[in-house]
Image: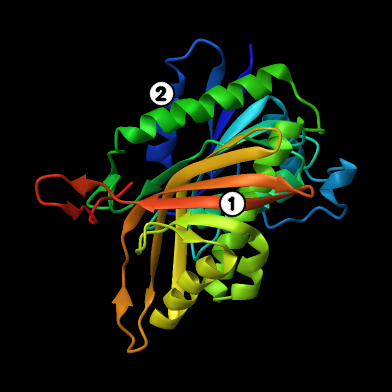
Amino acid sequence: MTRIGILIGSTRPGRKGDQVARWVHERATQRGDAEFEVIDLLDHPLPHLDEPLPALTGQYRHGHTRAWADTIARFDGFVMVTPEYNASIPGVLKNAIDHLYAEWTHKAVGFVSYGVRGGARAARQLRELCELLRMGAVTPQVSLSLHTDFEDQATLKPGAHHVGALDALLDRVVARSTEGRTATPAPRETDETAIRRHMDGIIDAIQAKDLEVLRRLYSADVVSFDIDPPLQHVGIDAKLKNWAKVFAFFQDVTYEVRDLMPTVGEDVAFAHGFGRLSGTLPDGTAAGGMWVRATFCFRKIDGEWLITHDQVSVPLDILGGKGVVDLEP
């Protein structure tokens, strides 16, 4: 039977990763299509990478590396549980991954992250690392917020909506692991990766306040249903004018996208998720922003995915006639 390892990516005292891994494992074991096992890095202490040869060679000199390789080789796929420390993954997780190569490659992997902002930046880095190792990183992922999914920021009590996201993640990890896909991904998976990288580019350009980079990421005829009036903003100049107003309003800008779910066709794709724009005002005041619902529509133009439509909205209090801006995903 297909074997999936649930890897706890932190060994820090007081970590919450063991709670998250137990939650993933409890949900996973209700399935009958695979066997699931928790892999705790506390049980596999590794020194800072001390192999004299690159892991790519497969020539592991030290006993601790060979033991770790034997553990990872037993699994067909993985769910990696990671916190976000200083906008990145824990060093112990990076070290554990760096010790090996062949034992990771061509295997499916999904990500469950947690942190103040859902651990989204850590998950993004981890996805890039796993793709570099030629792993099959699946699209669904789970992002748990310390504010809303942990009671007193200590005890895991995930929102009900995370269960569906976790099920979708497990579906894809098990399916890809069972199929035993090779290093060459299907075209659809390649396009999903391209869509995610495109969104990463949007985030980076917004936070850098770089209008010229943003211009290259939208189509010239983009139609935007933005949060600001009027009802629609037509064309790239109108879209960039909106971003220019944002950049003038904030001294420093932070843009987050959570629970992004792409759906890809031959030359048309869309992705939906939640976004939050926040930052620091010129007088130094922190502006926390609000979570909005966001949909991005793409067309493949001359072989490149470009955003041709985006829409941002908040739920409406029908009786009060006002938008509800204090919700968390």
Res. 308 mark: 1
Q: Which image quadrant for residue 289?
A: bottom left
Instruction: Say whether residue 32 is visible.
Output: yes
**Residue 4 placement (x, y as % from top left):** 59, 25
* Left or right position of 88 against 286: right
**Identity of the residue drawn at 49% across and 52% down:** 310
> Which residue occupies the foreground of this view, 273 or 136?
273
> Which residue occupies the foreground of this view, 209 or 241?
241
**Residue 153 placement (x, y as % from top left):** 28, 52
Q: Where the N terminus falls, by quadrant?
A: top right
Q: Give the vertical position of 278 relative to 234 (above or below).
A: below
Disc 2, SS:
helix
Res. 100 mark: none
**Identity of the residue drawn at 44% across and 45% down:** 273
Q: How crowded is mark 1: few (under 14 residues within 10 Å), some or many (20 or more)?
A: many
Q: Which residue has dot 2 on it?
A: 27
Q: Give the vertical position of 109 relative to 240 (above or below).
A: above
* Left or right position of 74 against 55: left
Q: Give the vertical position of 197 relative to 254 (above or below).
A: above
* Left or right position of 280 against 239: left
Amino acid type indicated by mark 2: Arg
> Which residue occupies the foreground of this view, 38 or 149?
149
Disc on the earlier residue, 1 or 2: 2
**Identity of the residue drawn at 72% across and 50% down:** 98
Amino acid type indicated by mark 1: Thr
Instruction: Say whether residue 14 is visible.
Output: no
